[in-house]
Image (cartoon, rainbow, N blue to C red):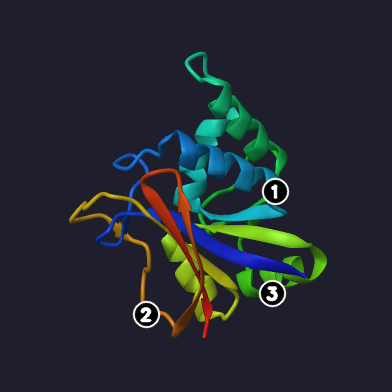
Amino acid sequence: MAKLIFGLSQSLDGYVDHLEMPPGPALFRHFVEHVRDLAGSVYGRRTYEIMRYWDKDRPEWDGEERDFAAAWRSQPKWVVSRTLKSVGPNATLVQNDVGAVLCELKAQLVGEIDVAGPDLARRLTDLGLVDEYRLYFRPFVLGHGTPFFAGPRPPLRLVASNPIGVDTIRLTYVPA
């Protein structure tokens, strides 16, 4: 059975913004390996549209960026949206009964399925479907933006803490 994992880099004051907090080399390599090992990813519309950046090779990319793009392109994706009419390669559009679709995916797949986006994570948490939260704390204070947690959460229990490179610590929580 697969687990739904919600994890993003966040500032010390709790906001997510990949443009304001670009990952350093160690964290980027961590994410390349993480994406390579996933059973798939579930995206909300906005996050999926941002991630479509990785669909086309860019001449300015280095080897790590090409590795990430290859890993991202190869994994199955499910995009939760009521407004999109179609999605790109290796992606499935989910417009109705998100809970049932994701319960079915969890039962069919083995490994980890990433949940991408705070609003989608809130919706899935409200349905009791998120199995683990991974908070990648970065040494930034943004003072604005989208919060990691888009709403109240059930009590959580810390199960791991791991440094990544010299500027990131990942805290892993499960519902208590």
Are circles 2 and 3 on residues that touch, CB within 8 Å?
A: no
Q: Amino acid at mark 2?
A: Pro
Between 81 and 138, the residue placed more toward the observer is 138
On screen, residue 155 above or below 105: below
Provide the residue designation for mark 2: 152
Q: Image quadrant of residue 30? A: top right
Between 28 and 164, the residue placed more toward the observer is 164
Q: Earlier in the sequence, mark 1 or mark 2?
A: 1
Tell me the element at label 3.
Answer: helix
Provide the residue designation for mark 1: 37
Q: Amino acid at mark 1?
A: Asp
The residue positioned 62% from the left and 29% from the top of the image is: 67
Task: For marks 1 and 3, give the one nearer the viewer.
Answer: 1
Q: Is residue 106 left or right of residue 132?
A: right
Marks 1 and 2, Cα distance to the nearest angstrom?
30 Å
Are circles 1 and 3 on residues that touch, CB within 8 Å?
A: no
Residue 154 rendering spot, x and y as whole percentages? 45, 84
Residue 89 rendering spot, x and y as whole percentages? 68, 37
Query: In this rendering, does residue 14 appear at all?
Result: yes
Residue 101 rendering spot, x and y as whole percentages? 70, 68
The quadrant in which the N terminus is found is bottom right
Q: Image quadrant of residue 86? A: top right
On screen, residue 125 above or below 88: below
Q: Earlier in the sequence, mark 1 or mark 3?
A: 1
Between 69 and 95, the residue placed more toward the observer is 69
